[in-house]
Image (cartoon, rainbow, N blue to C red):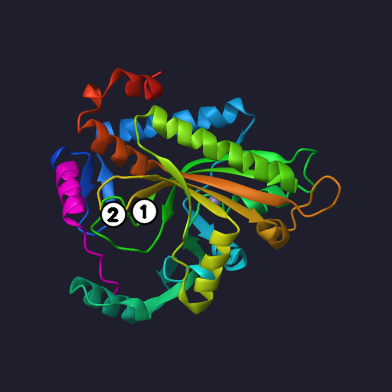
Amino acid sequence: MTEARAASPDQAQLLERLLEHGHLVASGVPGVYGHGAEFEDVRARLDERLSSEAADRGAERLRFPPLLPRHHLESSGYLGSFPHLAGTVYSFDGDERQAREQAELAARHEPWGEFQQMTELTLMPAACYPVYPAVAARGRLPVGGVFVDAGGAWVFRHEPSHDPARRQIFHQHELVRIGEPEAVLEWREEWADRGLALLRALGLDARLDVANDPFFGRRGRMLAANQQAERLKLELLVQIAGPEPTACASFNHHRDHFGSTWGIELSDGRTAHTACLGFGHERIVLALLQRHGMDPGAWPGSVRAELWR
Ligand code: ZN
């Protein structure tokens, strides 16, 4: 079992205040929380705001469940880069005797994995993953490509932590652009600026930086160096609870990775490029509560005007 990462004093104090105010509801497992009414209201408004920004710019709305077919995860390259973060769905497939044994072990909270078999499902690691095969299945892209709003979907990362900003399951709002290389890169740069402007309009002291993902193992260090050198991933960082600033959004350029994986073709038959933006709903709500206080009703008028339109 993976030990939960400890919280800094600031993070522990923030978590305590969030629980006290009923913004988060503890589950007994680090990094898994329910949301109180006010927290969820802010999150829903943020979701709406991001989707309407996207709709104004021609995004098509698609929604997917928080489960990803195992085959999609296997094709994506995720298990090579982040095997330690993936979650896989297992299910019982045995006889009555085994069911009894399993129940007995479970009653004592002892491991009962020996009775479990792999299913065709995994937990969604990133909300953009189902978009690529769905768009590929339509055939060649229209001229200009596509822009999809996959909404704020639940995603899973197995990294138990007592830092309230590092959750095992959270909403990631993904916007995805699939098209010609230049158009995709331009779109990402434009949205990085728009994301920065949005967070600043919410009164958050955000800055854009090149990201450094926790890739797994020795090969991972190479991937991380490449990611940095080629500016493949940008992040919007906000200081929530120390010591490090927290990434509240990321802007990824995949070049032709998903285009070749899924055979997504441009109108002229070349392989499409892709980019995605992921906004972490909960992290942004946490940053707002931390910055403007635990009572959203008392936030500055300029901040409220951005969300309560
Ligand atoms: Zn993505």
- Pointer 2: residues within 10 angstroms few (<14), some, or many (20+)? some
Residue 12 in sight here: yes
Q: Which residue is mark 2?
A: 32
- Whether residue 306 sits left or right of residue 242 in the image: it is right
Vertical relation: 254 (above or below) 192: below
Q: Is mark 2 within 8 Å of ligand 1?
A: no
Q: Secondary structure at mark 1?
A: strand
Q: Residue at x 30, y 63 (%)?
A: 160
- Pointer 1: residues within 10 angstroms few (<14), some, or many (20+)? many
Q: Which one is nearer the viewer's eye here, 189 or 125?
A: 189
Q: Which residue is mark 1?
A: 169
Q: Which residues are magenta?
A: 1-19
Residue 100 in which image quadrant: bottom left
Q: The N terminus is located in which quarter?
A: bottom left
Spot occupied by residue 287 in the image (x, y as percentages of width and height): 30, 40
Q: Which one is nearer the viewer's eye here, 96 or 291?
A: 291
Vertical relation: 308 (above or below) 227: above
